[in-house]
Amino acid sequence: MTHEGDDYLCVERLNKANKDDQPVFNSTLKGFRGRAAVEPAEGRPLRLRVQASNRRTLTFRPLADARRLESGRELSGRGPEALLYTGPVADLKVRLRDETGGSLCCMYGYEVAGHTTIAAAPESLLVNEAGRGARVSTPLPEGPLLLRFIDAEGSWRMKLRTV
């Protein structure tokens, strides 16, 4: 998703009662660009509620198109993103640069092997940090993993070191 300007942006997945069910994006980043892994709720077509006052674009792609986190290669970005990791057990180093003044940065990992939905995959909180220049190191289990970097209100860099 892209959103021009610096106004508030919120995208929520809706449940079968048409009520907010799961946050997809929630940001005040200027010139927002983000990626998220979203699946329909309860076996129905995907429905989203979008709150955004400026021009925006939503593009849907298969999860297989997500960027891949690879050992020995630094990956950088800005804002939320869904990433794939298929390597061995590793340590993930993350450096965050907050652009909105004290926002929270969270990353969840999902062990997707043998599961047909994200909701069925075991979930782990990998990063939960706030502040302007946080540096985090967290262990990753063997892939395949879906990494959901959410609430990232700034730029970030990641690098893996296999153990």
Image (cartoon, rainbow, N blue to C red):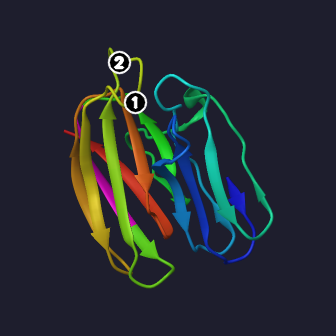
Left or right for 3, reference 162: right
Q: Residue at the spot x=46%, y=27% of the render?
A: 42
Q: Which residues are magenta?
A: 89-95
Q: CA distance from mark 2 to mark 1?
A: 7 Å
What is the secondary structure assignment of the residue under circle 2?
loop
Q: Residue at the spot x=42%, y=52% of the render?
A: 149
Graded by Cα atoms within 10 Å as few (under 14), some (14 to 19) or many (20 or more), the crowding at tag 2 reads few
Q: Is residue 139 visible?
A: yes
Which secondary structure class fits the magenta region best? strand
Q: Looking at the rendering, which quadrant does residue 163 occupy?
A: top left
Q: Looking at the rendering, which quadrant does residue 95 occupy?
A: bottom left
Q: Position of residue 135 (x, y in %)?
A: 29, 69
Q: Which residue lies under the disc numbered 2?
A: 115
Q: Amino acid at mark 2?
A: His
Q: Which mark is residue 138?
A: none
Q: Residue at the spot x=52%, y=63% of the render?
A: 26
Magenta span includes 90:
yes
Residue sitting at the far bottom = 101
Q: Residue at the spot x=65%, y=65% of the render?
A: 32
Labels 2 & 1 near each other (Cβ < 8 A): yes
Left or right for 14, reference 160: right
Q: Which residue lies under the disc numbered 1?
A: 118
Q: Is residue 79 visible?
A: no
Q: Position of residue 47 (x, y in %)?
A: 62, 39
Magenta span includes 110:
no
Residue sitting at the far top = 114
What is the secondary structure assignment of the residue under circle 1?
loop
Left or right for 125, reference 82: left
Q: Amino acid at mark 1?
A: Ile
Can you say whether 56 is above or below 48 in the image?
below
Q: Looking at the rendering, which quadrant does residue 111 occupy?
A: top left
Residue sitting at the far right = 55
